[in-house]
Amino acid sequence: MRLLLLWLAAFTLTAPALAETTQEIVNKAPNGLAQTPPMGWNSWNRFACSVNEKIIRDAADAMVASGMRDAGYQYVVIDDCWHGPRDANGFITADPQKFPSGIKALADYVHARGLKFGIYSDAGRFTCGGRPGSQGHEYQDALSYARWGVDYLKYDWCNTGDRNAQEAYALMADALRQTGRPIVFSMCEWGTAKPWLWAKNVGNLWRTTGDIWDSFSAKDKAHDWAHPMLENVDSNEPLWPHAGPGHWNDPDMLEVGNGGMTIAEYRSHFSLWAMMAAPLIAGNDIASMDAATRSILLNKEVIAVDQDALGVQGRRVSQAGGQEVWVKPLSGGAKAVLLFNRGDQPATILASADEVGRKKAKVRDLWAHRDLRWSGSLKAIVEPHGVAMFTVTPL
Ligand code: GLA
């Protein structure tokens, strides 16, 4: 108890001193984490507020049993609605009905499976789901997270009133830093304050868009905050110059396996995220996924494009009608090339020698899993809403 009080005193004393200027905090060295885009699973897209400790434990088990952990997925993240009330001293507690064993026990469970553990909060007084937010409790909450063994914080932007985003995110980044525990900081303010322009040393990833909706291109008219997959692609693509090791554009979590798109569309979704060096955070029920979903989330050749050490976000280099060519530079002078057909009819798409590179190369088809003969350019008949994806590695 005395130790805890000392800790607390230290935090209460240091917090005001550390609230230097926002600019000073923004200019601090990055935390060195997420040198490649974070990979993991998050409860929100599939379970929303109906989350509990069994769902999280099952997800951790499934991450191992399915082979996802070995394919690179690492973080198991509880999104909104895990919170109970604050206790008499202002510390956040877990919802006693949904998380009776507490968050520390859950983090231990996840860690025991060789995985990392993430949690969610909000920069306002309340989260989007109406649970207590961290405003005014930043240092205290960061301390709780560190004591529980949290490795990743997603920090949302609901109920923030006229709070300044740069200030609010820099403050929580500083609180996390003060714990001394490495904690990936996932900023979720939907791109409103253009975090790509200022948050390079604040967060490891920042949402560039509103929430993804499990649909290829159809708008959900009832919810203007919900965006079909392609809308998030088009918002995120032009931001490619701002991404790099330790700081990534985040077009939101994956919907692969949630049922609103066809298999071809989910393959496109996953491929486009990999081309954009986006965080690969699965959002389906991984404890009960079918073979098709598994084959997408576990395509190691596509994952390797996302996780390439060069850390350059790919971009669209040409488009004609609904047919697009995307290129992502990879380490060692290689390139990933994506042929994407937005249209409703099969289409022949050609990536020119200029786009592919003129040097003789090894060409690999990442969905057919086979090597192709190099011919200077790349051409494929691409199914409606589908992709063909290749790596081109100069010999
Ligand atoms: C916001 C975020 C979502 C999710 C919900 C939780 O909408 O953008 O990703 O975290 O809040 O309430």
Image (cartoon, rainbow, N blue to C red):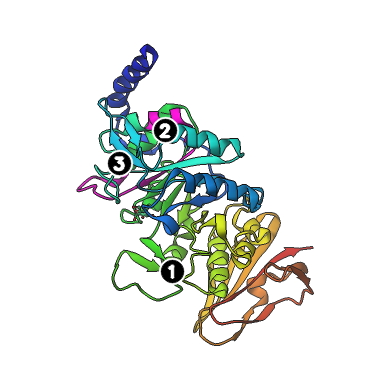
Q: In which quadrant is the C terminus drawn?
A: bottom right
In contact (CB < 8 Å): disc 2 and disc 1:
no
Q: In which quadrant is the N terminus drawn?
A: top left
Q: Which residues are magenta?
A: 142-166
Image check: 330 left or right of 22? right
Q: At x 52% / y 67%, what residue is drawn? A: 269
Q: Which mark is residue 234?
A: 1
Front: mark 2 or 1: 2
Residue type at mark 3?
A: Ala
Residue type at mark 1?
A: Asp
Q: Which residue is mark 2?
A: 145
- Is residue 160 located in the magenta-colored stretch of the structure? yes
2 or 3: tag closer to the N-terminus: 2
Instruction: Please tell me whether mark 3 sits on a helix, a strand or a loop.
Output: helix
Q: State the separation of the CA atoms marked 2 and 3.
A: 18 Å
Q: Is residue 185 visible?
A: no
2 or 1: tag closer to the N-terminus: 2
Residue 75 in picture, x, y percent from top left: 53, 45
Residue 121 in picture, x, y percent from top left: 35, 43
Disc 1 under 8 Å from ligand 1? The reply is no
Residue 342 in picture, x, y percent from top left: 51, 79
Residue type at mark 2?
A: Tyr
